[in-house]
Amino acid sequence: MQPFAYARPTTLAEAFSILQAYGRDARLLAGGTDLIIRLRDGTARPTIVVDVKRIPELRPAIRKEAGRLTISATTVMSEIASDERVRRHFVALAEAAAVVGAVQIRNRATLGGNICNASPAADTAPALLVYGADIVAVGSAGTRRIPITDFFVRSGQTTLQEGELVVAIELPLPSGPTGAVHLRRTRRRGHDLASVTLACLVDANGVTRLAFGSVGPRPVLSVDSSGVLADGAADDDAKAALLEEMFASASPSPGSMRASPEYRSAMLRLLGRRAVGTAVGRLAGG
Amino acid sequence: MIGRIGASPQRVGGRGRVTGLQQYVADIQLTDVLHAKLVTLACARGRIVSIDTSAAERVPGVRLVMTAADLPQPVPRFGPQFRDRPVLAIGETKYHGEPVAAVAADTKDAAEEAARLVKVEYQELPAVFTIEAALDPAAPLVQDADLRPGDKLATTNVLREHRVGWGDVEGTLADLIVENTYEFPMVTHFAIEPHAFMAAPDGEGIAVWSSIQHPSWLQKILAGILGLPLAKVRVYAPDPGGAFGGKQHAKYEPLVALMALRAGRPVRLVLTLEETFQAVRRASARINVRTGFHADGSFAFQDIAADYLIGAYADIADRVVGKGSYPGCGPYRVPAARIIARSVLSHTTPSTAFRGFGAPQVNWAVESNIDAGALALGIDRLELRLRNLARQGEAFIPFDTPADGHWELTVRRAAELIGWGTPLPPGRGRGIGVGIKSGPTTGLSYATVRLLADGSVIVYAGTSDMGQGARTILAQIASDELGAPLDWVAVVMGDTAVVPYDQQTSASRSTVLMGNAVLNACRDIQSRLRAMAARLEGIDPAEIVVEHGVVRLPGREVPIVDVLKPGLGRLGGELIGNGEMRKEGDPGHPLGGSAAFFEFNCTAIEAEVDSQTGDIVLVRHVTVSDVGKALNPLQVRMQDEGAAVMGLGHTLMEHYIFDEAGRIRNLGAIDYRIPTSMDLPLELLSDMVENEDGPGPYGSKGMSEGALLCVSAAVAGAVREATGAVIRDLPLTPERIWRSLQERRDG
Amino acid sequence: MATVPIDLTVNGRGRSLQVAPHHTLLDVLRDDLALTGAKECCLVGECGACTVIVDGRTVDSCLMLAVEADGALVTTIEGLAAGGRLTPIQEAFLDEGGVQCGFCIPGQVISAHALLEANPHPTRAEIEEGMAGNLCRCGCYQQIIEAILATVEAAHP
Ligand SMILES: Cc1cc2nc3c(=O)[nH]c(=O)nc-3n(C[C@H](O)[C@H](O)[C@H](O)COP(=O)(O)OP(=O)(O)OC[C@H]3O[C@@H](n4cnc5c(N)ncnc54)[C@H](O)[C@@H]3O)c2cc1C
Ligand code: FES
Ligand code: FES
């Protein structure tokens, strides 16, 4: 690893001033499970690494408050996967967090890091998309809430501005019963990066929200408000046509080592069908 | 704690391994050590135009920047089979990762930085990475023709062609001929311990530390390169952290030794996992099999043509090709056989020995082709195998050791454990494979055993314990023979200045060859004890028997110490025994010697396949080996189950992926997948057949590779039965299965 | 390169060190504290050979900067067998044959230990999942799982 300096701000203000002073030469560090690999392979070469874990606003916490669950940026996957409230209201997120790497990774990998790293394969992204999460970003200019649908740009790039950091992720609590699931494809059963990662949410009104990643430059949300997908009695062909439309934007990269575009496309559709089935079943099962 | 033969005591050396105190090469701290880092190019084949080391030399703490120009001229070349590998690339690199220079510095940081700063101007040259490309008449030559003077293949990329056979393949009539081509991928050892090397000037000589399987062989190679007598080259070989064949032969030891001599200080080089991918791998292979069957399922002939893609330097790869393909027809009665195997050079990582030593490749093809024949003939796959299987004593390879086991027992046991022939739920299938591998064709092991005055024992053996548990087995033998509790036996290994010569730790030989050497050393001590007892008792030695830790006198039996102590007398002292075990070669034999034993395994699989995704669930994996005698049944199980899991790796998920420049794209652990604890079969069952019919101590045979040999064919057979998909390329990824099922649906 | 002072507790012993910010916890344990039980293999968080416990949780020490461990309680494999007596899980690894070459074993033992601390009655599936971050190329998985099950069994007969 090439040398760099290290800062550990204990207030947001201190963090902003470091970010301001170093600009693009500063990199934020949360759990480091993405960043340290890049520091070692030389694809990230900051002059200073800014550890956000001791800023009070970012400290690991999951809070239930007025109509939403707020997960602070440095909450790690192990916490999210085992949190009762997440499991009750946001099961697809709990399932996604539970498959990020192996235990040692989940004990370090943060939710903020997973989305800020903006890998198309980020496993929590589809779940956050179907649940309509807001990303709470702060900068020296103040706080703004970025709808997750406006957050991802492409691999490694988000709409965060220079000098901004994510303090929390807010999830609106569902108003009625829902059924949801996270599914993915990997090359082995043990931990692996996904070649398709997908979440599905259906609600009592018959709205189906499907979000998927690793099949294009960024994770994408697609919504069926017609009620057809969630309707157990609906015609299979109609569902297939609808799914086809919802997945139209998927464009798996031909350069991937994990699987070919054809296979990924086929698996996306298959996982989509299976996820809808599971989500509908879970909704019915309460 | 008793170390009796046939018991399964805790592993000798286990305590250090569970407490973190066991020292592997990279854990050893030498004072004043310099850290080395290799300098490589970003392509496979690059012509080196110039190397500018000035910036690197200016990095504080850098003590040495070594290029080929700084080495003795001509730059020494070495290798176990051909002397083709230069200490550093000469003129051009031959594969991605081949070092063109190396730096040594006071700290790892300085070494890394300096390595980055060595400026190499180079020109990328056309290169070959596949069998087709390498065999193209217009292909660039991987090795200069003058490296192999007088060899008419020297102007091609075929390093050698190995032919064996018997009977008349062309003239034999068959009722059915099945011909197919199979592919086996390039895979790597992925020992969890990356290779580590150290060297330090040592008086007039040199001391070298290496995680090496063959310390004596390394000593010889180093002595040759450095122009030193063997006695001045001391090789320390701490137990390797996994080797699997990848640590048999010298890799960077010559470089590190030359650096240490030049710097006048110890130098250490610990490879990254990525660098190990560029240092060792298994040969990929394309195998064409033409099998002739009679209508009753008996074989008419086997006609096998195997091309193995080896790397840029031969290492031991050509021996792998010759020896691995040799038992290609399997343990069957085959009236006519022709096996042609070629080692094809390419601009890739030099392939080397890897558990199974070239046999898994051909086994995959031949066993799969046998399944294809059984299907076409409508004969049960197990039945067909049993019909053809050589019976004990049968010369199934006419000019080699006859079948040395009741192999049908092994096959039947595996079939029974998998429930062969019982009804299968939908979506499931079963497969069965039989594997055989020739044991060592030559061998020479010496052992020294000291029985100390208190009855404790020290065994000196040049074997490397890389996880197979040689320490435990050798200690058990000494414990059993000399009556010392197992924890009173110390086993000293891995120091050529202390332990006697051993040819090598490979081919599952150590229990048989070193085991016999230790046994002979113990017998040597026993005969001295007999003389001692005779003297003490005043009787004829012929009336005394010493065995299994006791001295049998007329009418009574006493522990060995009871004779030893009075026998040694007031000054104490000890008894020293020496043992030797030789397996002579035979110059007329195609492999230079007949097999000391055969490793025999039968693997059976039950699998469930999700036809929509291609996912395979291994419901049950059965592996049964003929081990002659299990000196330590738990260790047999560990070896067989470990080999089975490793076999699942190349069967289901492992393979190198290259880019156009010949770089391994999935270099390192992120995109090269090996099995995890979650990838185990739902049930993994191992069993063994023991008829005490092996050449090793107490009737044992070598084992530990067998359970890997036929995993692929057994899994593919199960997938075929479950889904109808026939796949001839490994690994059997879900995508390949899915594709094959798509094609069947479409077609 | 400027170093940073850190204070941490390793295996119950307080340590004050000067570390380079770009050195990982693994680097510092091995090179500065000569605790070579944690091993170096993949350096990308895949193999778990470098697993140690930081503040009660297992981490891959190759993916954690040493400076991040300032103030932390770290347990390495060397810290388990206090007073030279093997813990039940270490004994079980040996009894069940969970150790071949041993290179992955410090990480495996630490993970198994932490798994049982967090979940004293794991199912086989939970063990397989909980141990998936520790690769073993010798393929000791089956015996390691059995060692963990045997430890559970012995603690709660
Ligand atoms: C072995 C292994 C397996 C993995 N498996 C998976 C997997 O299965 N699924 C998956 O999705 N991911 C996986 N990952 C990737 C990684 O663990 C996750 O993306 C993780 O959530 C990243 O979080 P972190 O806290 O470690 O991020 P860091 O590495 O600390 O940071 C990642 C990026 O986000 C930025 N960042 C971090 N926090 C903030 C913040 N609060 N505000 C602004 N920017 C910030 C950093 O500057 C950096 O660019 C794996 C990684 C490894 C090493
Ligand atoms: S070395 Fe840290 S996970 Fe492999
Ligand atoms: S025991 Fe060798 S890698 Fe696990």
Image (tube, coloured by chain):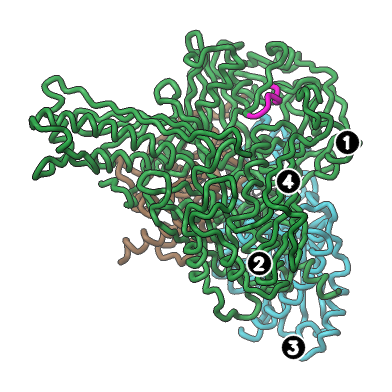
Q: Distance between the Cα atoms at labels 1 and 4? A: 22 Å
Q: Main secondary structure of the magenta part?
A: loop
- The image position of residue B501, as x and y in percent, is 45, 26
Q: Nearer the viewer, mark 1 or mark 3?
A: 1
Please give the letter of the chain rendered in cyan: A
Q: A224 above or below B709?
A: below
Label 2 chain ID: B
Q: For the residues labelled 1 and 3, say whether their Cβ atoms are less than 8 Å apart.
A: no
Q: Which residue is mark 1?
A: B139
Q: Is residue A108 above or below residue A194?
A: above
Q: Residue furthest bottom?
A: A233
Query: Could you tell which of marks 1 and 2 lies nearer the N-terminus?
Result: 1
Residue A246 lies in the magenta stretch:
no
Residue B294 is left or right of residue B531, and the answer is right
Tag 3: amino acid: Gly
Task: Determine the secondary structure under disc 3.
Answer: loop
Which dot, 2 or 3, sits closer to the camera?
Answer: 2
Q: Colour of chain C?
A: brown
Q: Going 51% across and 25% down the picture, which residue do you hit?
A: B209
Q: Amino acid at mark 4?
A: Ile
- Judging by the rendered image, the residue that carries numbered circle 3 is A232
Q: Colour of chain B?
A: green
What segment is highlighted magenta in the picture?
Answer: B81-86
Q: Work out how far the residue at label 2 is from the one at label 4, CA to CA, in angstroms.
A: 25 Å
Q: Amino acid at mark 1?
A: Ala
Name the N-terminal-most of marks 2 and 4.
4
- Residue B532: which quarter of the image? top left
Front position in the image: B648 or A142? B648
Q: For the residue carrying disc 4, how many other residues have a C-alpha within 10 Å: few (<14), some (14-19), or many (20+)?
A: many
